[in-house]
Amino acid sequence: MSVTFYPNMIQHVGFAAADEPSVTTQNYACSGGETTGAAYDCVDNRRTNQLTVDTNGEGTDFHIELDLTSSLTADFCIIDNHNLNTATGLFSIQQGGADVIPTSSYSGTLGGALAADGIDAFEITPVADGIVLAKFTSSADAGWDLLFLDVAGTNFGADCLFGELCLGTSFAPAFSPELQPTFDYDMPGSSFNESDSGQRYGFSTHTNKRRAWKMTWKYMSDANKASLETIFLYTRGVKNPFYIDLGESATPHLYYVRFMRGLSFKGLTKDAWQVDMFIEEEL
């Protein structure tokens, strides 16, 4: 089982929150109703909040641009909670104004095995709505840009929706961990009240299940330990969620999670460590 971390480095590098990300050449609306200013839904760590770009029945291409405070080195891009397949849209990734050549791309449902997308030179055509993971040769720049186009010979089939944008450097430890799914099927949003007479009544705002995993590496090198610590820095510990592939299938199988607590390192030898990590699914 090969585990791969996909941390979002956008918040770590920083950006001007009043202006970034920006949408050009198309009208748009944020989840809060704003139609000008930053398209904040793409970088708010809340994948359920969606940016809506007014493309239904139109043929005008558009950009989602992100000018960062400093250079970001990335080898992957994730677009989460999108509808590009339904909207008959395709996209390309650009850094510093230059097209990035994808080496692979996969689309599908968060928490399920993803399927390979169509790739034509720079352009990626997602085979499904949901989440898309595009990989490319590591590149660094402070200016990143996603260009969205309709399928040749047609207009967009719907307004384009986007929940979250993730850029960063992936990390796969050299050795696989012992994975203990705790599957704490909590029902967040469910609770009960008790009256003065002792009568109880329950209520629930939603019934989504939240899963959790304990991961133990019996051996991890100094170099891999440093990489894992860097990811913990990118997420600011438990503050920001990230994506992870637990290696359950031949193609990527992504979850949106966050650290539940700090990392635990136990020294084995001078250059080797045992590592315990707890992660929990983000709804």
Image (tube, rainbow, N blue to C red):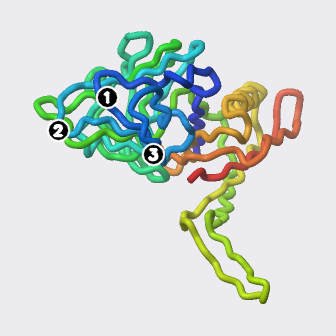
Give me the C-alpha separation between circle 2 and circle 3: 37 Å
Relative horizontal placement of residue 236, taking residue 83 as reference (left or right) = right
> What residue is disc 2 on?
57
Give me the C-alpha separation between circle 1 and circle 3: 24 Å
Give neighbour class at mark 2: few <14, some 14-19, many 20+ (Cα, 10 Å).
some
Residue 38, labelled with which disc?
none
Q: Nearer the viewer, mark 2 or mark 3?
A: 2
User: Between disc 1 and disc 3, whose residue precedes?
Assistant: 1
Pointer 2 with pointer 3, Cβ within 8 A: no
> What residue is disc 1 on?
91
Q: Can the viewer see residue 102? A: no
User: Between disc 2 and disc 3, whose residue precedes?
Assistant: 2
Give the residue at x 26% y 46%.
86
Vertical relation: 66 (above or below) 109: above
Q: Nearer the viewer, mark 2 or mark 1?
A: 2
The amino acid on which the numbered mark 3 sits, given as a three-letter code, is Ala
Q: Where is residue 93 in the image (x, y as percent from the top left)?
A: 38, 22
Q: Can the viewer see residue 143? A: yes
Q: Position of residue 46 (x, y in %)?
A: 54, 44
Q: Position of residue 168 (x, y in %)?
A: 55, 26
Q: What element carries label 2?
A: loop
